[in-house]
Amino acid sequence: MTVAPPPPPPPTSGSFTPPQGSYTLPPGAPPPPPAKSSGCWKALAIGCGIIVVLGAAAVLCLVIFVFSVIKRSDVYREAYTRASNDPRVVAALGTPIEKGWWVMGKVSVDTNGGLANIDFPISGPKGSARVHAAASHENDTWNYSSLVVRPAAGGEIDVLHH
């Protein structure tokens, strides 16, 4: 013999009414999990963070590239060599004289010639200085109009004119 469940009660007005009263957890039951927030804000924050980090890395790479191009130029190398071999600069800074990292300025060369205007730091055991060089490029030669070393202790050393 088979027993069938009783039929559901007929709808009264076509709408569902929830049971009245409050629900409490039975003793010893684990608490319900917290309601999860949407992951949309987390994804947006992570995406924006990645974009900011990649942008900063791109700017850093560009700055390093520009510095390395200027440091490989003939003007930079010759200005450093002349400044570090000048006896007045050696007396002011001591030896060895080291190149600094931060280079500012511009070097441009085309088929008609070129111009350079750069500024970079040097240092020795006795102190530090900034080197300023300005030159023009004609007939495969850089002609310096200015090559000045400015020690941090004061004064100015014109390396072009002894």
Image (cartoon, rainbow, N blue to C red):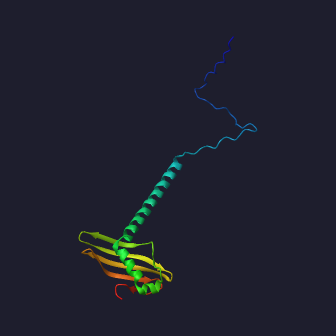
Q: Is residue 89 above or below residue 30?
A: below
Residue lying at 51% horizontally and 48% vertically, measured from the top left: 43
| Residue found at the far bottom of this picture | 162
Residue lying at 45% horizontally and 81% vertically, measured from the top left: 129
Residue lying at 40% horizontally and 63% vertically, measured from the top left: 62
The number of numbered discs placed on residues in the rendered structure image is 0
User: Which quadrant of the figure contains the N terminus?
Assistant: top right
From the viewer's side, name the closer residue of 30 and 82: 82
Q: Image check: 42 left or right of 2?
A: left
From the viewer's side, name the closer residue of 158 and 32: 158
Q: Image check: 160 left or right of 27?
A: left
User: Which quadrant of the figure contains the C terminus?
Assistant: bottom left
Q: Position of residue 127 (x, y in %)?
A: 49, 82
| Residue found at the far top of this picture | 1
Q: Is residue 38 above or below residue 114?
A: above
From the viewer's side, name the closer residue of 5 and 16: 5
Residue 131: image quadrant is bottom left
From the viewer's side, name the closer residue of 150 and 126: 126
Q: Position of residue 90 (x, y in %)?
A: 44, 84
Q: Position of residue 141 (x, y in %)?
A: 28, 76
Q: Position of residue 158 (x, y in %)?
A: 37, 86
| Residue found at the far right of this picture | 27
Residue lying at 34% horizontally and 73% vertically, measured from the top left: 74
Residue 86: image quadrant is bottom left
